[in-house]
Amino acid sequence: MSLYQSSVKKPIMTALVYVAVIIIGIFSLSKLPVDLFPEMGENTIMVFTTYPGASAADIENNISKPLENVLNGISDLKNITSNSKENYSIIYLEFEYGVDINEATNDVRDKLDMFNSMLPDGANLPFIFKFSMEDIPILMLSVQSNESTDALYKILDDKVASPLRRIRGVGTVSVAGAPQREIQIYCDPYKLEAYNLTIEGIASRIAAENQNVPLGNIDLGSETYSMRVHGEFSSAKLMEDVIVGSFNNQNVFLRDVAIVKDTIQERMQEVYNNGMRGAMVGVRKQSGSNSVEIANKVFEKLPEIQQSLPSDVKLDLIANTSDSIVNTINSLQETIIIILILVIFVVLFFLGRWRATFIIALVIPVSLVSSFIYLFLTGNSLNIISLSSLSLAIGLVVDDAIVVIENITTHIERGTKPKSAAIFATSEISLSIIAATLVLIAVFLPLTFLEGMVGVMFEQLGWIVTIVITVSLIAAMSLTPMLSSLMLKSDPKRGKVFGTIYKPIEKGLAKLDKGYSNFLKWSVSHRSVIVVSALVLFGGSILLMKFVPTEFFPVQDQARLSISVKYPIGTRLETTRAFGLEFSEHVKKNYPEVLMCNFSVGQADEDNAYMMLSDNGSHIISFNLRFKKKTERKRSITELADQLREDLKKYPEINSFAVTMGLGMLSSQNVDIEVYGYDFEKTDKFANEIADRMRKVPGCTEVNISRDEYTPEIQIDFDRQKLAENGLSLTTASSFVRNRFNGFIASYYREDGEEYNIKVRYAPEFRQSVEAIENILVYNSSGAGIRIKDLGTVVEQLTPPTIVRKNRERMVKVSAIVGEDAVLSEIVAAANKELKQMDKPADIDYKIAGAWEDQQESFQDLITLMLLIVILVYIVMASQFESFTYPFVIMFSIPFGFSGVLIGLAITSTPLGIMALVGLMMLIGIVVKNGIVLIDYTILCRERGMNIKDAVVAAGRSRLRPILMTTLTTVLGMIPLALDKGEGAEMWNSLGMTVAWGLSMSTIVTLVLIPILYSLFADFGVFRKNRKLKKLATT
Amino acid sequence: MKAVFISFYQAFYDEVIDVLDNLEIRGFTYWPEVQGRGSETGEPHYGTHTWPTLNAAVLTFIEDHKVKALLDAVHQLDLSAPQQGIKAFVLHAEEA
């Protein structure tokens, strides 16, 4: 028994099967995590190698180069970049997306094992570090506090970070900007000298005094007691009474040579929120956990945390990555509901029957829900790609059901009982709906073959649409006939109200049918006019290609900007802080859209890995701006970024600045010009020239050069001979300087289970000149003190910057940022023009990389895929028609789909990006489907005995409504996608635009040109047949 | 004894059997899928792409007095769905 037969005969079973599908689907939906994009996985591995004392060039030659050579052989490696700095080298291994990173890590480890024996003496073993999206905090909280600044770290650590860490799924919680408590022992060098004391000696005295000593056991009576001395300092003040030495038989107390301060650490990152001093708390998630869920849990906890804090400490939000995820997904969900309603409305409009519409509409949830089951089983999430795939699919899933219902209705109208009609009508058209679904599968399934980043993105699209339309086909062949057999009546009557509303619509549709068949009649006899005007249209639209710019991914408005401002290297914290405060005041005044302006300045803590990885230093100020939602403000994020750039240009003292939009790969678009060459000077010159030229290109808002300038440094050049004469080693002498300036951690001060550093060093006033360095006394083993200036010279020098290599060659990157109203392809064209005009030294090479390179690669992949799809679709059609000619005729509608897309994109000035290309691919499937419906019926008419002209007109008239209906369900479904202005809508705007324009255009062409082409080819077929017959007759 | 051959669109099987049952005609032979076309305006039923429908046929041998009732009933059925073209033909038959 066939599917439709058994489902009509067993309605309860059929209904319950679908109820079960829906229940499982809803269950899966409730378990699905929400995310912005499908899981990309990690694709970068870093290899750190330290080689203390080596210069950047040494590191490059001895560590980076050999490591690159060894690591280069690893499979699936896309790019290998290295940074060689003083003392250490970092190698970034970038793999293709979708590669199993654990396997890659093992490969890297194996290669490193091989390399270890080749490492220079003194270099430490390389270690591997994986950086992924998880290392970016999902939440950043700002902390404002007026009075509690000094104790802020402890407050935040105890009251904020600890409770947050206890939340399931939260990874690390780090506190930045809050100073940590430290006991400072500030010594006076003159007094130390007078009493013959050293920093090291004082430190060891303090360490010796700050101890608990176990003394063994004592038996007293019948009990045994343990004895100990509790010597740890219970207050910092007590340290002042420690005897640190003796002079002239008098005790020297610490208070005689130093001041003890229970205070905070000296150098640290300072954080300001809305101009107020405070701190920042970053919350990271554990790998694999869901950011939205974690953010929600954190927000639940926050009011409770706020209550426990001192009254002057206030928590607020700087950035919430989950926020934009939730908003984006919500706006997409709204769009899907609109599409659903529109589709149902279109069906009702054309069929004019409530019951039929209801039956068709029921197929939508059943098939959509099946995709949730797929997502759940494969461990995927609800994201932009999966949801926009669903919104694409809605228009497609009703098609099969429409065809089935239409045929069943015809049979019922002819007098068959609904039950039998449901079975036999479905049986008649089952083959043709299977073929139509196969065409769509031929379009979407190949998407799952894509590799790289695009592959990760579109694998879901491919699977979801394939699964959804397969389920919709099955539903159309079981659920639809079952419901029709029960719900459709032999003599359907419209309700009075509905009848009056629908009557004019019916009349209009009838007029449309008549008009179209009249037009077809005319055009069958004026074929050349039609063909020529179609060619003109196609040619004209190709000319429009020039006006359609291209991009990779659209820039998304995530309502946040980050700005990194660099002062000349070595600028003191005070200057940069003053700028930060001034600029945040300026932002507050001129940008009412800003909700939170946070900036940090200064050297980051060593224990804050994320902060360490981003640039930091006393000359760098990093701003984080959070804006009102996209829908609640007038200026777009690109406009705001451009305006801020203009503002920043007004500060001449700034060395360079970079304004970046949002987070992640969709944030902003760069044109990266990579300049390769060994010679520093030549590449610098070339890079600077191209940067200068690019700055003049309109639409290019910001140009940055990756290579830093030479850094000024104070160097102490020890004279080895003098060191030897005094019995000193280089290490001893340097550690003396380090301990006096940077400080020596003598011991730990313990209080309430926490440990704080006790640091001994020179008081700040004795650390402010080069002379202070020169006057440091270094003691040798015989106890004689020698001044640094007698051991060497202190000089100011410039050290070369980091040496960056990419794919085993030295590289400088010039990044041009694409501004508002400009697009990637235009800037690239401008860059190419400028580069051609420059005279390039022979040993320098350049390449345009960045988003452009990714775009080119993905476009190439997609275009290859498109060809594959066209061939597959042709194969499916040719086997269905058992003919080579008719599929060819049908395929003529594809180029007009492209014309429609070009016209649409040119009119709305939407750039052609990845999403638009996906739209194009969908178009192939839908456009061809329309053609099949039309040609199939024309062939049928001819086989039923009509002549070519009559067949063309009759088929056109009969198939006009089904074609219009299936097209309109898709086109109207795309309009909300195309016009959506909600958060994240940039992603699917161009997709909607492409499909809506392309499909409308190609449908009109299909309805006019395809019948005419068919009649031409059919006439030719008849002509050939006649000639053959004539030949046979004459022989 | 007469042989009545009824050819009808597949989907009318239930209705045709109902007619036979109502007239207490027990014996019949049924072909679920036969092809053919009507003599005048009848649409072909070939089960092909062009003519996707198929006919079914029932042959029953009945007493002479039941023939008129059966033909009337089949005609009524035909009138209920004139486009489907249900036809009955009577042949002379002899009982062996």
Image (cartoon, coloured by chain):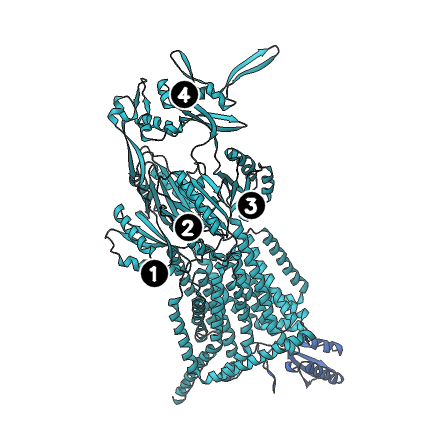
Q: CA distance from mark 1 to mark 3?
A: 44 Å
Residue A655 seen anywhere in this rendered image of the structure: yes
Circle 2 SS class: strand
Q: Amino acid at mark 3?
A: Ile
Looking at numbered disc 4 in the image, what kind of residue is underneath it?
A: Val
Label 4 residue SS: helix
Residue A659 is marked as: 2
Disc on the earlier residue, 1 or 2: 2
* Callout 1 touching callout 2 (CB < 8 Å): no
Q: Which residue is mark 4?
A: A257
Q: Are marks 1 and 3 on the same chain?
A: yes
- Secondary structure at badge 3 equals helix
Task: State the residue position of label 1.
Answer: A829
Among the two numbered marks 1 and 4 on one chain, the one whose residue lies closer to the N terminus: 4
Do the dots labelled 2 and 3 sit on one chain? yes
Crowding at mark 4 (Cα within 10 Å: few <14, some 14-19, many 20+) = many
Expressed as whole percent of the image width and height from the top left, the position of residue A848 reads 34, 55
Of the residues shown, which amino acid type is indicated by label 1? Ala
Of A63 and B31, nearer the camera is: A63
